[in-house]
Amino acid sequence: MSNNEILAAEHAPAEPMGDEAEFAALVESFVREQAPRVFALAEEMGGGERGDAEISA
């Protein structure tokens, strides 16, 4: 699944994005791609159901 497909799913009914390990790897890849070179914070949304994540830089 490409990053664009995952972002498009934001507007679809929320379903878990893979298992916990897959979701963690996905968030980690977003952090690496979008984070400034100083620091970034990543927060999982959805009460532990792996529905979404937000990166703040």
Image (spheres, rainbow, N blue to C red):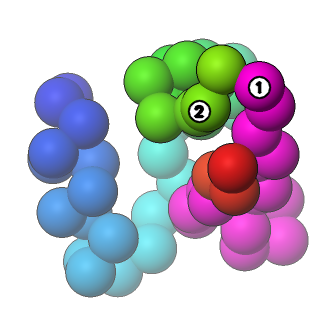
Q: Amino acid at mark 2?
A: Ala
SS assignment at label 1: loop
Which residue: 15% across, 45% down? 4
Which contiguous range is marked in magenta?
Answer: 38-54
In the displayed structure image, the side of residue 22 where residue 38 appears, left or right: right
Single out the residue that lies furthest toward the front: 38
Left or right: 28, with 34 as reference point: right
The residue shown at (18%, 63%) is 8
Residue 18 vs 12, above or below: the answer is above
Task: Estimate the x, y position of residue 20 in percent, counting from the top left.
Answer: 71, 31
Using the numbered discs, state the Cα–Cα distance from disc 1 to disc 2 in whole angstroms: 8 Å
47 left or right of 19 in image? right
Relative to 11, is 36 on the left or the right? right
Q: Nearer the viewer, residue 39 or 5?
A: 39
Q: Is residue 42 above or below residue 28?
A: below
Q: Nearer the viewer, residue 39 or 15?
A: 39
Residue 35, label in figure: 2
Please determine whether, in this image, residue 17 is positioned above or below residue 33.
Answer: below
Callout 1 amino acid: Val
Q: Secondary structure at mark 2?
A: loop
* Residue 27 in view in this figure: yes
Q: Does 50 lie within the magenta span?
A: yes
Above or below, comparing residue 3 to residue 53 in the picture? above
The residue at the point 28 percent across, 48 percent down is: 6
Q: Which mark is residue 38?
A: 1
Q: Could you say which is closer to the camera, residue 48 or residue 8?
A: 8
User: Residue 33: x, y in percent?
Assistant: 44, 24
Q: Residue 42: x percent and y percent?
A: 76, 46
The quarter of the displayed image where residue 31 is located: top right
User: Which one is in front in this view, the residue at disc 1 or the one at disc 2?
Assistant: 1
Marks 2 and 1: in contact by CB < 8 Å? no
Picture disc at residue 52: none
